[in-house]
Amino acid sequence: LAKTTQPISMDSYEGQEVNITCSHNNIATNDYITWYQQFPSQGPRFIIQGYKTKVTNEVASLFIPADRKSSTLSLPRVSLSDTAVYYCLVGDFDNTDKLIFGTGTRLQVFP
Amino acid sequence: GAVVSQHPSWVICKSGTSVKIECRSLDFQATTMFWYRQFPKQSLMLMATSNEGSKATYEQGVEKDKFLINHASLTLSTLTVTSAHPEDSSFYICSADPTGNYGYTFGSGTRLTVV
């Protein structure tokens, strides 16, 4: 599984757009990029997944450049409830493949 | 959507006793489930992979005799912390993939406190 590198923490204010970048230089051809969100004392929650270019859902957007060596999770107009830890994972995730979590990015949103 | 139910949410036990944590897939079958442990302010650490009908696969450094895993059916995996000690106090989380499309679902976690 490809190793990922993310900023340890980020601060933002309500209403701003937040972009969290993840580096995965050793990503393999069959690897997907997945982002999870975790609140304190809860299990992680799936946010978004992509392979290349751009993916958007009701929660976030995921931007993946052509070389796929990095990806950016974009959270539009964050609110206080978006304060959480965000994890970027990379792997060829069939349903028997294990998820290895990196350090994650602790996002703090201020009023 | 797919749900992974984990019980109990929290448990306090005395040193030397054993504690069982259950992880159930409510609306899908899971041949494989994963168990994680998370200490405060740290990331999730994978402990073991639970395989229905066969032995669990443990990550390096995880004592399989201390953390017993049983995957008795396609919807239930259990983690038993045997002879618990205060250093076993942690947040334990299970997960499974309901779709095979890489969208792993996690349980709500179990906060274990050993006193």
Image: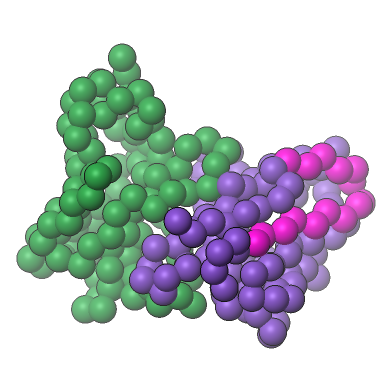
Chain colours: A green, B purple
Q: Residue at x 58, y 53 (%)?
A: B107
Instruction: Please tell me which residue lies in front, A30 or A4.
Output: A30
Q: Residue at x 15, y 65 (%)?
A: A52
User: Where does residue B8 sit, x and y in percent of width and height?
Assistant: 73, 47
User: Where does residue B85 sit, x and y in percent of width and height?
Assistant: 83, 49
Q: Residue at x 28, y 68 (%)?
A: A32
> In which quadrant is the C terminus of chain A drawn?
top left
Whether residue A14 is situated above or below residue B42 in the rendered picture: above
Instruction: Please tell me which residue lies in front, B41 or A33.
Output: A33
Q: Residue at x 26, y 25 (%)?
A: A12
Whether residue A79 is situated above or below residue B10 in the rendered picture: above
Q: In the image as oriented, which residue stretches furthest toward the top?
A: A111
Residue B115's image quarter? top right
- Asked if residue A38 lies left or right of residue A4, the reply is right
Q: In the image as oriented, which residue stretches furthest toward the bottom?
A: B54
**Residue B12 in sight in this render:** yes
User: Where does residue B15 sit, x and y in percent of width and height?
Assistant: 89, 46
- Disc count in the image? 0
> In which quadrant is the N terminus of chain A drawn?
bottom left
Whether residue B108 is situated above or below residue B45 in the rendered picture: above
- Asked if residue A15 lies left or right of residue A43, the reply is left
**Residue A5 in sight in this render:** no
Q: Main secondary structure of the magenta part?
A: strand
Q: Which residues are magenta?
A: B10-24
Whether residue A19 is situated above or below residue B64 in the rendered picture: above
Please tell me whether residue B21 belongs to the stretch shown in magenta: yes
